[in-house]
Image (cartoon, rainbow, N blue to C red):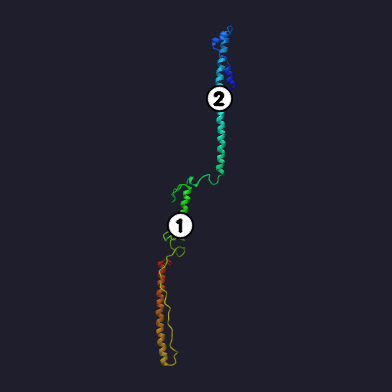
Amino acid sequence: MAETVISTILRQTLDFSYAEIEQEHPNWSKKAVDDYFYKQSNINTLAVSGTNIEEQVTLNTAQIELNVTNIALNAQNLTNHINDTAGAHNASAIFYDNSGTSISFDNVQGALSELDSDLDGHILSDSEHGVTGDNVGTGDFATALVGGVVNLSALIDDAVESTVSVDSPDASDLPTVITLANELKGDVNQLVTDLNNSIVQFNALLDAMKTAKQMSP
């Protein structure tokens, strides 16, 4: 380190002892010798203290310069961090509070991946919501005023078409009248039978709809 003014003062000081001062100046009074000796001692003390202070100032200056460099570097890193819209924070490094949820991960990346997987599974499922789950409306099954799900009703056989027809010729005398009347009687009885069979099928359809909850019982 280059020699400072204070170091130069310290090097140029004679630093006489008390006896050496008396020897160099035999005509001085004791008071003058005391004054010279103490001033010389104080100068030496100040020079040493000044040198130590100057060295500390030099060290502090270097540290300040290093701190300024670090501050500038940190400021640049912070700017880079703010401007980095893609990689500033990986989603896996961001905490997610999963308490009170069904999510098992406690970071954003894991939570999003789990939700994506659950959604894919939900979309691909053909029976995700059964009759015991949430469906259209506020209940599992439809009511008279609220929509909902209905079950597939039981299969009911088709009603049999009636084949009754009057084939006898028009009546022209008593025998033909009797024949036509007898045929009409049989056909009417058959129509009643066919009607009753249709009623049975219709009632079976109503029962199936009630069982499937498509109709109130």
Tell me where residue 33 appears, x and y as whole percent: 57, 10
Residues packed near mark 1 inside 10 Å, few (<14), some (14 to 19) or many (20 plus): few
Residue 154 in the image, given as x and y percentages of width and height: 40, 69
Counting residues from the start of the chain, the first of labels 1 and 2 encountered is 2
- Is residue 197 left or right of 22 when viewed as pictured? left
Camera-side residue of 187 and 123:
123
* Quadrant of res 14: top right
Residue sitting nearer the eye, 86 or 158: 86
Numbered disc 1: secondary structure: helix
Q: Position of residue 195 (x, y in %)?
A: 41, 78
Residue occupying the far front of the picture: 1
Q: Give the number of the mark in front: 1 or 2.
A: 2
Is residue 13 placed above or below 76 in the rendered structure? above
Residue sticking out furthest to the right: 5
What residue does disc 1 label? 122
In three-dimensional space, the C-alpha distance between marks 1 and 2, rounded to whole angstroms, equals 74 Å
For the C terminus, the image quarter is bottom left
Element carrying mark 2: helix
Q: Residue furthest bottom?
A: 173
Residue at image point 47% right, 51% down: 113
Choose between 122 and 217: the one closer to the eye. Answer: 122
Q: Give the labeled residue for mark 2.
A: 55
In this rendering, the answer to whether 114 lies above or below 70 is: below
Q: Tell me whether circle 1 and circle 2 mark residues in contact (CB < 8 Å).
A: no
Residue type at mark 1? His
Residue 138: x percent and y percent? 45, 60
Q: Residue 53's quadrant in the figure? A: top right
